[in-house]
Amino acid sequence: MIPEIGHFALILALSIAIVQGVFPLLGSLIGRNNWVAIAKPASFAQMFFLSVSFACLLFAFLTNDFSVKYVANNSNSQMPTIFRISALWGAHEGSLLLWALTLGGWGAAVGYFSKGIPPIMLARVLSVMGLIGVGFMLFMLLTSNPFERLLQIPAEGRQLNPLLQDIGLAIHPPMLYMGYVGLSVAFSFAIAAMIGGKLDAAWARWARPWTNIAWMFLTFGITLGSWWAYYELGWGGWWFWDPVENASLMPWIVGTALIHSLAVTEKRASFKAWTILLCILGFSLSLLGTFLVRSGVLTSVHSFASDPERGLFILIFLLVVIGSSLTLFAFRAHKFRSVGIFSLVSRESGLLVNNVILIIMTATVLLGTLYPLIIDAFGSGKISVGPPYFNYVTVPLGTLLLITMGFGFFIRWKKDQPSRILKKIWIPLTVSLVAAFVLPLILISDFNVKTTLGLFLGSWVTLGALMWVVSLGRSPFKLPLSSWGSVIAHIGMAMTVIGITLVSIYDTEKDVRLEIGQSYDLAGYNFAFTNIESLKVDNYIASRATLDVTQEGKLVNKMYPEKRDYGRDQMPMTEAGIDAGFTRDLFAALGEPLGNNAWSFRIYHKPFVRWIWLGGVLMGLGGMLAAFDKRYRRTRKVIVKQTLPSSELKNSSDQVSGATA
Amino acid sequence: MKPRTKRLFFVLLALCCVGAASALITKAMKGNLAYLHTPEQVLAGEVPEGQVFRLGGLVKEGSLERSKTDLEARFIVRDNRNNEITVVTNKILPDLFAEGKSQVSRGKMAKDGLFYAEEVLAKHDAEYMPKELSDTLNKEHAPAPAKKGTYQ
């Protein structure tokens, strides 16, 4: 009964989404206010029925209702409750439902927090979001219904892939989805602006906080995913340039470009058409990511069993979304004349360079990700593009990006003098250069060009951000949240870069064979294999090794890497032993028994690896702080005033806001 | 600066960036692409010597041998037409590695006729074989006579 209610609620949500997608938009075009007014309640109702649907599926998981095919395939009664919940989005159908729920949630949030947005604009935004929802719910109901019943009810369900039975994975997909789907808000704002043919500073102020929040979730999602891969996959890597990782990275890069481009659009009334294009691109890449993961066209650790029909549906949906929005763009782009002029040496130019670099990065990652598909389509063989390709391309581009980033803090909007900038930058430039050359010499008495470069870039950006915030000359308590956000996010970026540099250059990894009683020396630490035991936990049997880690004779830590056997044709799982630290991680993964009490081990020493994720957390935090800046709420009053005067004044609001910002 | 010169400057800047990026990409693509080959293709001499490639196929039942002193492992990879190549690796074999199951290893053929793998992957779950591998293994070939690898 409950699953049928869920199914029915999903169908109702679809019907509401259709109404939400059609009538407010039509009403806004032909001037029927009562149709326009449907948008907000419809978004709430859609959210409500999606929640009901989601709750029903959750109930089926919690009560082990194996008559539901999806539950029977992905959960069993032996699994701990937390993983029976996360199993809901552990496979295709449920993750689509989560996606739809997230979209509904974003729509309802836009509806709720929209007091300053004119009803016509809001109606169009919510209509576009409704139409996207229609696409996804149709997809679910036609090809992948999570509520499908089994005629023969099994006594016990199958297992969720053991890899996914982990707390990191319980929260990683929802975070990532919040980010992916959140970009649909910026996209919908862009489409609404194109339909209305008007894009002003007020529009940018509406779109900015939503973009920031989506970007924050994407940042947290990617960071979590990287951390999860590090400790759960047992390979000890934090980024593999796997197609599915790339699929989440691309919207993030474009989202980063969009945040900066929106700043220019708001403050200088420039980059308008470009901003719109980035909104479209960001969401299209989110959809492409979904297509890549769901269709199984790419060989990846994330691939679920593939189903061509599903891939085709998403591909068509992708084409419709990109095709229609770009067509609209072609007709309306000429209306978005950028009125803010700027000279060569100006913050606008700096941000232009930022955007160009970020887009080139996206393009190269996209090329590397799709290249195997293209080659295969031409029938010239099955290839894989290795990580060196991506590193080779992104490292130089990233270097350029970070150098520009440091300058960006010191350059004024519109027009600046190179001599004035030079006066400002010589201190941070010298300090970061000295730090980059001297620190490695003192601390590890080693000189490596790459280390120096990474340290320079990191300290250059950090110092730039700090000096900028000090030069604003306000007490920390009166500083606008957006300034706090900006500083924290950029310092986060610097931390990540330093972490990546140091761990890439100085990490040591070794696969070894150890018998009980034997030990191995790595990076000044001694790893002694002292014991192996067998434990029965929840729904698996673990072989747990004990490694005593000593440094110069002193015990640092005991590590317990495990191999877990989940039985029933499931693959074994590697649970790494990790001794985490601010400046270094020790990592040991248990391989396989080799006979004679010998096991294979994978032992790593990873300096500064935590900085990568710490930086990610700071970046996300910065994005969130910036989104809650008072400015985005205060401006609503200004907008109300602006709509009162005659229409000519309205059209010139670009120049007005441009001049005052 | 006149608007036109400025525009020209930005266009040139963009062109430079695109040019530099293309150059980087072309360079990076060289040598970082690894083709997937079956033992049959390798034995037929389709793979140039010294090239890094990925060898895909099934692990022959009963072929896995381990060293008594270090991590070295050897196993035989075969395709559907009984072409066989011996793989040598010093790395930990993945959790899903099993005799009779599919695997993909990345490495080079050496003069001694052995395939030295830097990485062994078994990226399937309990039921599925990666699509690219099943495509390659099932590709139509003239049925070759059953043979032991000429390399051995």
Image (tube, coloured by chain):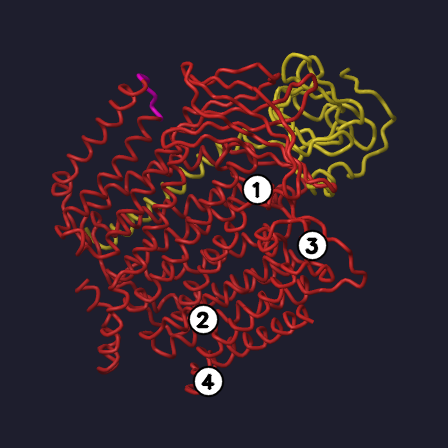
Judge whether residue A297 can be spotted in this image: no
- Cα separation between marks 4 and 3: 39 Å
Q: Which amino acid does label 1 sit on?
A: Tyr
- Cα separation between marks 1 and 4: 46 Å
Secondary structure beneath disc 4? helix
- Dot in front, 2 or 4: 2
**Sooner in the amino-acid sequence: mark 1 or mark 4:** 4
Relative side of A608 to A517, left or right: left
Q: Do labels 4 and 3 share a chain?
A: yes
Residue A35: mark:
4
Front-lying residue, A637 or A591: A591
Q: What residue type is labelled 3?
A: Pro
Q: What residue type is labelled 4?
A: Trp
- Dot in front, 2 or 1: 2
Which residue is disc 1 drawn over? A371
Q: Tell me where residue A218 appears, x and y as whole percent.
A: 44, 52
Which residue is disc 3 drawn over? A308
Q: The red chain is which one?
A: A
Q: What residue type is labelled 2?
A: Ala
Is disc 3 in contact with disc 2, using a CB cutoff of under 8 Å?
no
Q: Tell me where residue B128 appears, x and y as whole percent.
A: 72, 43
Q: Residue B8, relative to residue A542: is it above or below? A: below
Find the magenta span and give its range. A445-450
